[in-house]
Image: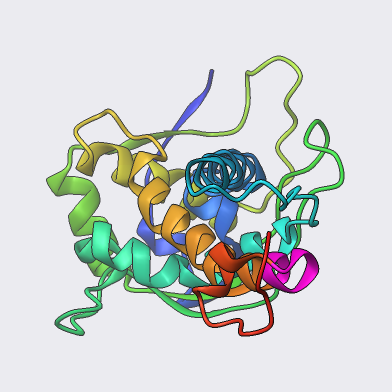
Amino acid sequence: MGTMVFDAGILPERMQVNLVNLIGGVYDGILVSGILNGELDREADFLRDSGCRGCKYEFESDFEGLFKAGAELLPHLLGQEFPELFGSPITGEKGAITIESVGTAELSDDYFSSTDYVPATIAIDRGKLASLMAENGVSELWDGHGRSGFVRTADADYWTVCQAVPELMGSMQGGAFEDLWLVEPISELSSDYFHEVVDQELAEKYGCPVHSENGTPWAWGC
């Protein structure tokens, strides 16, 4: 595959990106789906262990809603995990990349032909980004050519930042860059969904005293 030398000078001060591309596809519908399915299994175990036999657990989970909620959390989570790159949510110190806003996320209709879409406006501190690249020993990036079945269509600036940022994230993770750092916060988000929405729905639908403990007063027997 062809390579190119990183050049911060071609990057604009501000640009529109798909966060899924910017962070290397770490956050996507496949990740969220797996987490949601895990929460479904845990909730089913809870129902069985708590003696709730009447709740048949046939509600429709809001997978798209959970994906969008997770996307809205990304700027904060990225800052927690990579403060030098994305800015610290604790100290307020700016990083090389500032995610100024995140729009409405959209799930891909076909993972074979397109990616999930999390629109965002980012500001780029070219000096800080170049310094981080040098500090982490990242100088060459894939230029988008030479891979069978892949055709690069992105402009040079967009392609460069979407290659540089994942490379930096991987370097900061010691080369073992995976999506595991996102699993816990998205799982917590999913769990909140169940406790706030599902338990109430089950209590209302089946009159379950187990779920009524969460504050739904109308159920007396399961």
Residue 159 seen in the current view? no
Q: Nearer the viewer, residue 96 or 174?
A: 174
What percent of the width, then of the height, locates residue 110? Answer: 85, 39
Taking the view exactly as shown, the residue that stands out farthest to the front is: 221
Please say if 162 is above or below 12: above
Queried whether the magenta region covers residue 88, the answer comes back as: no
Which residue is located at x 59 percent, y 38 percent? 34
Outermost residue toward the top?
148
Q: Is residue 204 magenta?
A: yes
Q: Position of residue 113 (x, y in %)?
A: 83, 36
Query: In terms of secondary structure, what is the magenta stretch mainly?
Result: helix
| In this view, 191 is above or below 102 | above
- State the colouring used for the structure image: rainbow
Residue 217 rendering spot, x and y as whole percentages: 61, 85
> Quadrant location of residue 168?
top left
Relative image position of residue 92 (x, y in whole percent): 20, 85
**Residue at horizontal 28 percent and vertical 28 percent from the top:** 176
Instruction: State whether residue 7 is above or below residue 120.
Output: above
Q: Looking at the rendering, which quadrant does residue 77 occupy?
A: bottom left
Tell me if 53 is positioned left or right of 139 in this view. Answer: right
Q: Is residue 134 left or right of residue 201?
A: left
Residue depicted at x 86% and y 46%: 109
**Region of the chain picked out in magenta, as a range:** 201-207
Quadrant holding the N terminus? top right
